[in-house]
Amino acid sequence: MRTTLPLRLLCGIALIVLSRAAAAQEPGEPWETTMKMEMAGGMSMPEQTQRICRPKGKTEEAGMPPMDDRCKLVESKQVGNKHVFKMRCEDGANRYTMDGETQGSSESYRGRMHMVGTMDGEKVDMVQTFSGKKLPGSCTVEDPMKQYKSVLAGECRKAMDKMEFAMFTMDNAPCADQKAEFCGKVEKKLQELRDPARYREEGTRPETAEMARGCGQDLAAIKREACSRSVGAKDWSFVASQCEEEGRALAKQHCEGRDYTAAMSTPYAPICSRYMARPKGRDYTAAATAPAPAGQPTPAAQPPSATDTIKKGADKLKKFLKF
């Protein structure tokens, strides 16, 4: 499970921002817009397409970022139908610039914007490309916040179905008002991990720990229950890989004082391999990695340590695109 959804949501929000829709209802023109976001380091989203209703005669505003007291326009130049601009933004420790250009007519436009600088003490480098074309017919311009809420509601439902925790539990999460519902699903899911087989599949995943932490669930207690059940079921492979307290106690009881080779021929081989003292100068690597005795499952491979690179990247984009 990767936390790419916030970026997908931000693409939808950005399309709304690019629409430059008026707050009050008024006659408008239907447009089809596309946008793509890419961040240095490989974080990107495929091109997103949306139909929007734009106020008549507002094509020249397409592609310009929303203005607020964080950002100042430091350069603006119009050459024919091409507009080049540069903005400098400062918000506490956040400092970045945005260079962009747009080109268009009353029927279509295209453009590119590059944001580079520092956010939360880390470098950010993002490129946004966009385009639009006018469609036949007419439409009524809607409040942009109404459009935003519609996009958000759909993405929150998708995130709920996919258990994408960052949308509900991270700081300033876009779906925070549905956190209680999400955490109810998390609690139910975590209870299933009391079964050692289910814990082996999902309990050690970084996302599981993040969900438990974000929803205030005690994953350690669930792991202890899984360990207790694994001892009762004599699942020594699980005990060896996941249950240090139980593993060490069983190693003391069934492995200490025995010849290593003899110990490795018993059902407690996974535990002996991990916890029993080994004489100096002897290599038991082969024995330690040998298949478990018949009836004992092979220890699950440990996943790599968790990183929050994508989450941080989504946070940065969210700050950039906030209304």
Image (cartoon, grey):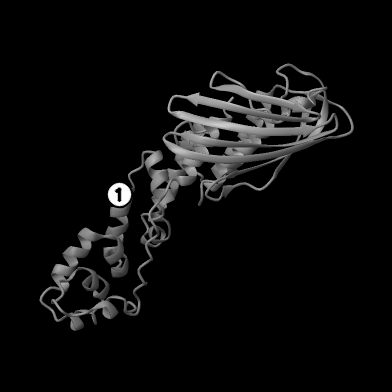
Which quarter of the picture shows residue 9?
top right
Q: Secondary structure at mark 1?
A: helix
For the residue pair 228 and 62, the one nearer the viewer reads as 62
Task: Please indicate, yes or no, whether residue 165 appears anywhere in the rendered image.
Answer: no
Q: Give residue 131's position: percent from left, percent from top.
A: 75, 38
Please rate how many residues cluster around mark 1, counting C-alpha atoms within 10 Å: few if below 14, some from 14 to 19, many from 20.
few
Q: Give residue 216's position: percent from left, percent from top.
A: 36, 38
Q: Is residue 5 above or below residue 68?
A: below
Task: Please indicate, yes or no, whether residue 158 appears anywhere in the rendered image.
Answer: yes
Q: Give residue 85's position: percent from left, percent from top.
A: 66, 28
Q: Give residue 190's position: percent from left, percent from top.
A: 40, 49
Q: Is residue 198 above or below residue 178?
A: below
In this view, the residue farthest toward the left is 257
For the residue pair 292 and 40, the one nearer the viewer reads as 40
Q: Quadrant of the C terminus?
A: top right
Q: Is residue 300 left or right of residue 172?
A: left
Q: Which residue is mark 1?
A: 220
Amino acid type for the residue under numbered disc 1:
Ala
| Residue found 14% across the figure and 69% down from its top | 253
